[in-house]
């Protein structure tokens, strides 16, 4: 298989090729949220584990980097014979405080690596468990979008995959306030816990279809973002987690007038990603990390094993969108 080299145009061409093969499926709506399926008939079977699968089988362990711990870093040990896919925004529960992943990573087989994370529980720094467990949810969509932009800026400025921790905390605090959730440790998980039934209702209703390798998410008629994978099998496993992340935003913004989902706006977002400025960096783990930016979007892609393993992008808030 072709190996991508950082700094070459191959990475952007691979993203453009992946988007060129995407077709929009028939949208489904639950409440004020619509999913537009991203179909790709080329997608095949996976040659990696998801993080949930790796942890459930006892093949992946995530711990603090030391007894003292270090907020932006965690240690991951992959004892599997296969790489493990970690999704940007996935939540990790336990140890000294809950975190979310700062980027998508393909952790190599039989290796230990350090992964960059963001704290989503500002009020705790005490050991709750020796290891982290995975969560059924991820960083809520708007928070994930802003953190993605922060990480891209950090990478370009100083080569670090850091977020703005105070901005992350402020967003969680503001969401908790708007949703009237009290958390003794300012934990994002407590917001999800309070709204479990409503969030799960979205995830139970909005499920993956055949040949669906990705999904674009629409709330109140506005396209928020999308995630695209190299396999329908991966999307099927991770879609519930993604739906929950958007559902928390949808619940907060329920209106009497839901709005009409615009397929044209989804097409415009995909086109904007293909036209976005792309900068490449050696990935944490396998492959190449591609960061995408434009006047109204932020995005990121992981290219490895000769293909686009994961690609995601978000419209930045306050952008006028097209409507059918």
Image (cartoon, rainbow, N blue to C red):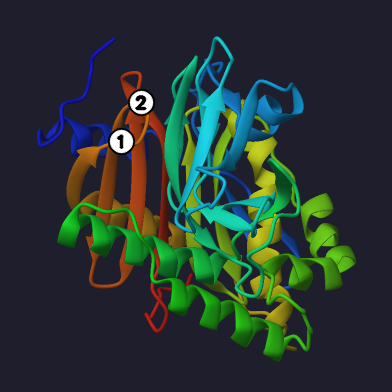
How crowded pointer 2 is (Cα within 10 Å; few <14, some 14-19, many 20+) is rated as: some
In the rendered structure, find residue 286 and report the number of the disc placed on it: 2
Residue 46: percent from left, percent from top: 55, 18
- Give the answer, above or below, for where 285 lies relative to 126: above
- Give the answer, above or below, for where 231 lies relative to 163: above
Residue 26: percent from left, percent from top: 63, 48
Relative side of 199 to 53, left or right:
right
In the rendered structure, find residue 155 and report the number of the disc placed on it: none
Residue 290 appears in the picture as rendered: yes
Which residue ends up furthest to the right in the rendered image? 197
Q: Residue at x 73, y 65 (%)?
A: 189
Element type where label 2 sits in the image: loop
Cα gap from disc 2 to disc 1, whole angstroms? 6 Å
Residue 318: percent from left, percent from top: 40, 84
Q: Residue at x 33, y 37 (%)?
A: 20
Closest to the observer, 230 or 281: 281
Closest to the observer, 162 or 305: 162
Relative side of 157 to 194, left or right:
left
Which residue ends up furthest to the front in the rendered image? 67
Residue that label 1 marks: 283
Residue 27 appears in the picture as rendered: no
- Confirm or deny contact between disc 2 and disc 1 (CB under 8 A): yes
Where, quadrant-wise, is the N terminus in this rendering? Answer: top left
Which residue ends up furthest to the left in the rendered image? 8
- Give the answer, above or below, for where 83 lies relative to 143: above
């Amino acid at each position: 298989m072709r190996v991508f080299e950082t700094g070459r145009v191959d990475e952007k061409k691979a993203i453009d090729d992946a988007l060129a093969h995407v077709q929009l499926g028939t949208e489904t709506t639950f409440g004020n949220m619509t999913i537009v399926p991203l179909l790709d008939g080329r997608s095949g079977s996976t040659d990696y584990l998801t993080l949930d699968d790796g942890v459930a089988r006892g093949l992946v362990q995530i711990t603090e980097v030391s007894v003292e711990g270090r907020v932006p870093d965690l240690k991951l040990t992959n004892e599997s014979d296969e790489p493990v896919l970690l999704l940007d925004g996935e939540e990790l529960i336990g140890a000294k405080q809950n975190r979310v992943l700062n980027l998508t990573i393909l952790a190599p087989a039989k290796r230990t690596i350090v992964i960059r994370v963001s704290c989503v529980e500002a009020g705790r720094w005490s050991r709750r468990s020796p290891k982290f467990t995975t969560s059924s949810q991820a960083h809520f969509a708007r928070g994930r979008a802003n953190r993605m932009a922060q990480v891209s800026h950090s990478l370009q400025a100083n080569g670090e995959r850091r977020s703005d921790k105070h901005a992350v905390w402020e967003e969680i605090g503001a969401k908790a306030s708007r949703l009237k959730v009290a958390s003794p440790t300012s934990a994002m998980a407590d917001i999800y816990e309070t709204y479990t039934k409503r969030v799960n209702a979205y995830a139970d209703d909005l499920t993956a279809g055949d040949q669906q390798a990705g999904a674009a998410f629409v709330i109140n008629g506005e396209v928020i973002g999308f995630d695209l994978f190299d396999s329908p099998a991966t999307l099927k496993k991770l879609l519930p987690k993604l739906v929950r992340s958007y559902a928390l935003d949808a619940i907060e913004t329920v209106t009497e007038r839901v709005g009409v989902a615009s397929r044209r706006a989804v097409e415009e977002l995909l086109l904007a990603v293909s036209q976005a400025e792309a900068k490449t960096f050696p990935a944490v783990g396998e492959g190449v990390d591609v960061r995408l930016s434009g006047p109204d979007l932020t995005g990121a892609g992981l290219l490895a094993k000769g293909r686009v393993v994961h690609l995601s992008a978000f419209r930045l808030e306050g952008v006028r969108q097209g409507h059918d």
